[in-house]
Image (cartoon, helix red, strand yellow):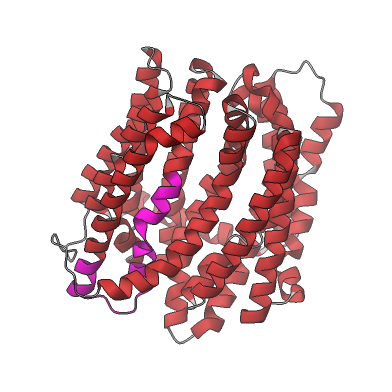
């Protein structure tokens, strides 16, 4: 269990470093670039993100969940990554001009052509990250992703200051990929082959077809609001919606993305071991207890304090995204109960069920967004909420059918988290009701955040939440290490 906590520590450290650097970059670039400039890059990045899902072709998931890996399988995985990624590089290059014409944005052509170069670079380290995750070597993953973020930040800010406009973010993305490639070569596991091989590609292709199909539909659902807004409403509206999503994604970057790289191999290990599928389900219930104890207070605080937060992060030219943030906090809070279900289903051999679920949820979300877009950004935000609520219902039905996790079991897992949200939410509600409107945004935000944190900690121990035990254990471990350093003999 200590090894798992060690993995969580470095996974959180990595995500918090990336998050902090991303926030710094956002605060600077939001004041250097206009919403229209940011919108051009955002649209290009969303289109390339869809291709990025196919680029992996499930190789990462295959390497993590495969029970026995040998040289032949690793060489086949490398061959699959190279083939798919380089084909996608050519596809994005060819599609750049037609996509720019479709969206009526000529600047998009160069953005897509330059971003397509990432597909040539990434396969050179395609096996490194999944193998490091399989081995729970999160210290090495920290180094790779931190290098990417540092270089991305420096290049973006320097070029924006020198008047490169939206192109500063494009060049920064390429520079970050080069930096992460160089570091990945330094920490590359020794058993990874340098040459690709054909034997075994069929098995990877069969697995990848399911994994990529589900991931592509899921990513299409994530990208759908940006693609629809960019076409039906406009580039500037796309940038505003993107900023609202960026605020909501703070939780995903700080918590979800730090937990998921650890819980997926952990679910898989429990499923491979003596505990079988039941062992993985026990870990899942504990995970959602932890997730909701963090997510629900966070999104409640965010909904209340969206205005000062946007002023501090982005400046006054982005205030139109405040109502969007408040609306979509609801959907993020609801879905936090089921955000880890994907990893449980894949780790326990239920990948086809996950693909069907992603497909149904994606179709529903796109239909709702297309219906809402003619009525403006607020209607789109409510469509996102309804889409995530319906998706949560679908995930619950899948879990109940395949894993016998009914609503009573889930309710017991999250009941303390709901009470904890009520306790920690007293501070932002009080600030929203009684704080003077002319209070400086930074003062209102930091003061309320501190009070909310104190209320949350008090509620955590008052309710004897499962997460409180983890805090006490971490405190004892840190104290023990400090005493060992002070008294080496």
Q: Quadrant of residue 319?
A: top right
The question of residue 473 being in magenta is answered with no
Q: Quadrant of residue 480?
A: bottom left
Q: Main secondary structure of the magenta part?
A: helix
Residue 237 as seen in the image, left or right of residue 21: right
Position of residue 262 measured from the top left corner of the image (x, y, whole percent): 45, 62
**In front: 285, or 97?**
97
Question: Looking at the image, which residue sits at the far left?
Answer: 195
Q: Residue at x 43, y 29 (%)?
A: 108
Query: Which quarter shows the C terminus?
Result: bottom left
**In front: 412, or 49?**
49
Res 346 visible: yes
Q: Quadrant of residue 114?
A: top left
- Vertical side of 347 occupied by 273: above or below: below
Position of residue 137 measured from the top left corner of the image (x, y, whole percent): 32, 59
Magenta-drawn segment: 49-76
- Vertical side of 225 occupied by 287: above or below: below
Question: Looking at the image, which residue sits at the far right?
Answer: 433
Q: Residue at x 48, y 65 (%)?
A: 263
Position of residue 206 measured from the top left corner of the image (x, y, whole percent): 37, 73
The question of residue 62 being in magenta is answered with yes
- Vertical side of 241 occupied by 292: above or below: below
Residue 463 as seen in the image, left or right of residue 150: right
Res 13 visible: no
Position of residue 84 measured from the top left corner of the image (x, y, whole percent): 30, 56
Q: Residue at x 47, y 73 (%)?
A: 347
**In front: 60, or 224?**
224
**In front: 76, or 476?**
76
């Amino acid at each position: 269990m200590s090894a798992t906590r060690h993995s969580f520590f470095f996974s959180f450290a990595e995500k918090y470093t990336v998050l902090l650097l991303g926030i710094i970059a956002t605060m600077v670039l939001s004041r250097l670039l206009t919403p229209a400039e940011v919108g051009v890059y955002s649209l290009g990045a969303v289109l390339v993100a869809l291709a990025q899902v196919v680029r992996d072709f499930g190789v990462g998931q295959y390497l993590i969940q495969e029970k026995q890996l040998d040289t032949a399988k690793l060489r086949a995985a490398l061959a699959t990554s190279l083939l798919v990624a380089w084909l996608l590089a050519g596809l994005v290059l060819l599609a750049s001009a037609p996509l720019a014409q479709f969206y009526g944005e000529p600047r998009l052509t160069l953005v897509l052509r330059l971003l397509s170069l990432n597909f040539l670079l990434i396969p050179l380290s395609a096996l490194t990250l999944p193998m490091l995750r399989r081995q729970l070597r999160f210290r090495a993953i920290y180094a790779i992703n931190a290098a990417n973020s540092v270089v991305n930040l420096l290049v973006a800010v320097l070029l924006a200051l020198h008047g490169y406009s939206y192109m500063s973010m494009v060049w920064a993305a390429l520079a970050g990929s080069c930096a992460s490639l160089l570091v990945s070569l330094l920490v590359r596991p020794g058993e990874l082959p340098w040459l690709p091989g054909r034997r075994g590609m069929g098995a990877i292709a069969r697995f990848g077809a399911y994994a990529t199909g589900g991931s592509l539909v899921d990513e299409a659902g994530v990208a759908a609001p940006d693609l629809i807004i960019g076409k039906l409403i406009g580039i500037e509206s796309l940038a505003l919606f993107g900023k609202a999503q960026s605020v909501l994604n703070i939780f995903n970057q700080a918590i979800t993305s730090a937990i998921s790289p650890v819980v997926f191999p952990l679910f898989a290990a429990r499923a491979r071991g003596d505990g079988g599928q039941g062992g993985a389900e026990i870990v899942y219930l504990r995970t959602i207890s932890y997730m909701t104890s963090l997510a629900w207070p966070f999104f409640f605080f965010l909904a209340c304090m969206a205005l000062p937060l946007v002023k501090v992060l982005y400046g006054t030219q982005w205030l139109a995204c405040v109502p969007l943030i408040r609306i979509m906090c609801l959907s993020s809070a609801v879905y936090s109960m089921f955000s880890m279900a994907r990893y449980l289903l894949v780790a326990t051999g239920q990948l086809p069920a996950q693909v069907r679920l992603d497909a149904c949820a994606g179709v529903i979300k796109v239909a709702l967004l297309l219906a809402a877009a003619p009525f403006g950004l607020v209607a789109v935000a409510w469509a996102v909420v309804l889409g995530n609520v319906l998706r949560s219902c679908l995930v619950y039905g899948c879990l109940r059918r395949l894993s016998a996790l009914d609503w009573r079991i889930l309710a017991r897992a999250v009941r303390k988290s709901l009470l904890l949200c009520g306790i920690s939410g007293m501070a932002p509600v009080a600030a929203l009701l009684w704080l003077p409107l002319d209070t400086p945004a930074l003062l209102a935000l930091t003061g309320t955040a501190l009070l909310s944190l104190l209320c949350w900690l008090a509620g955590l121990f008052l309710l004897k939440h499962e997460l409180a035990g983890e805090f006490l254990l971490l405190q004892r471990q840190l104290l023990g290490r400090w005493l060992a350093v002070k008294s080496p003999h």
